[in-house]
Image (tube, grey):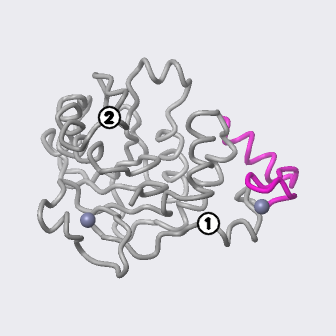
């Protein structure tokens, strides 16, 4: 709905670049000079999207402890100005920033092997009520439209709030997250594409993936805007 209004605005050429406010911007909402400055992630671990000097099938971490998800892709390094745009989108209702990021990312991380369904990483209902929207769900909707893949926003539920994850160490995050997701539905035999805004340690994806695989999903891949090194 919001996206429809935005697309309408953009198609009329009224929108200005979400980064430099020059205008009118390109249909994706970011002007060409700003787009060239974005920190695209060209070289990463194919398994967990960790930035590497050379692309590799698995980084040292993934060799030592392979994640449950089959692959992960992120469009950008979590760095200026993408980090700022993501925070505007996530915490300050800047849906135009989200729309631009989603469109550009969809072109950059288009899957080679298409998942059967896209599923956003859910927010706990309390967080959802405070924020009013789930940024991962908006991203999944846009990716789904660009890639022609159905989106199932309610397949995965977050039934435990894990609010202060950012401050916790990986071990603790995993323990907290392990039991925080539930599958409502039957992903049996399906290849699920999980969508999130940022991959930080991969712990959230790992927990959600395990939950989906236990519920019968055949395979899980992950798609995000940005990866924290
Ligand atoms: Zn610009
Ligand atoms: Zn890796």
Residues at circles 1 and 2 in contact by the CB criterion of under 8 Å: no
Q: CA distance from mark 1 to mark 2?
A: 33 Å
Tag 2's secondary structure?
loop
Which image quarter holds the N terminus?
top right
- The circle on residue 186 is none
Image region (quadrant) for ligand 2: bottom left
Residue 130 appears anywhere in the view: yes
Q: Is residue 26 visible?
A: no
Position of residue 189 measured from the top left corner of the image (x, y, whole percent): 18, 50
Which residue is at a point 57% across and 42% down the rendered structure image?
A: 87
Q: Is residue 106 left or right of residue 60?
A: right
Question: Looking at the image, is 73 positioned above or below residue 7?
Answer: below
For the C terminus, which image quadrant? bottom left
User: Dot 1 lies on which element?
Assistant: loop
Comparing 41 with 3, the one in front is 41
Q: Earlier in the sequence, mark 1 or mark 2?
A: 1
The reply, left or right, for residue 204 in relation to residue 212 is right
Q: Which mark is residue 38?
A: 1
The stretch of residues the image draws in magenta is 1-25
Residue drawn at x 23%, y 47% is 206
Q: Where is residue 133, by image quadrant?
A: top right
Majority SS type along the magenta span = loop
Residue lying at 50% horizontally and 18% vertically, measured from the top left: 129
In the image, is residue 13 above or below residue 112? above
The residue drawn where x is 73% and y is 48% is: 7
| Residue 11 belongs to magenta span | yes
Pointer 2 residue: 155
Cβ at disc 1 under 8 Å from ligand 1: no
Residue 169 screen position, x and y as percent: 25, 41
Q: Is residue 29 left or right of residue 214?
A: right
């Amino acid at each position: 709905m919001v996206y429809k209004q935005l697309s309408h605005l953009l198609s009329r050429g009224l929108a200005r670049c979400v980064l430099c406010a020059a205008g009118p911007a390109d249909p994706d909402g970011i002007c060409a000079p700003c787009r060239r400055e974005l920190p695209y992630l060209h070289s990463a671990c194919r398994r967990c999207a960790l930035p590497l000097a050379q692309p590799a099938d698995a980084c040292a971490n993934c060799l030592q402890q392979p994640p449950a998800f089959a692959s992960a892709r992120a469009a950008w390094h979590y760095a200026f100005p993408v980090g700022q745009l993501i925070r505007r989108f996530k915490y300050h209702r800047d849906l135009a920033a989200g729309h631009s990021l989603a469109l550009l990312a969809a072109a950059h991380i288009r899957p080679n092997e298409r998942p059967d369904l896209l599923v956003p990483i859910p927010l706990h209902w309390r967080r959802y009520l405070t924020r009013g929207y789930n940024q991962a769900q908006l991203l999944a909707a846009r990716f789904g439209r660009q890639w022609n893949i159905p989106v199932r926003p309610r397949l995965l539920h977050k039934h435990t709030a894990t609010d202060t994850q950012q401050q916790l160490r990986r071990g603790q995050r995993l323990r907290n997250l392990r039991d925080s997701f539930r599958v409502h539905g039957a992903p049996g035999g399906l290849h699920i594409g999980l969508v999130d805004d940022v991959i930080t340690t991969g712990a959230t994806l790992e927990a959600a993936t395990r939950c989906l695989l236990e519920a019968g999903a055949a395979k899980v891949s992950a798609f995000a805007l940005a990866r924290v090194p």
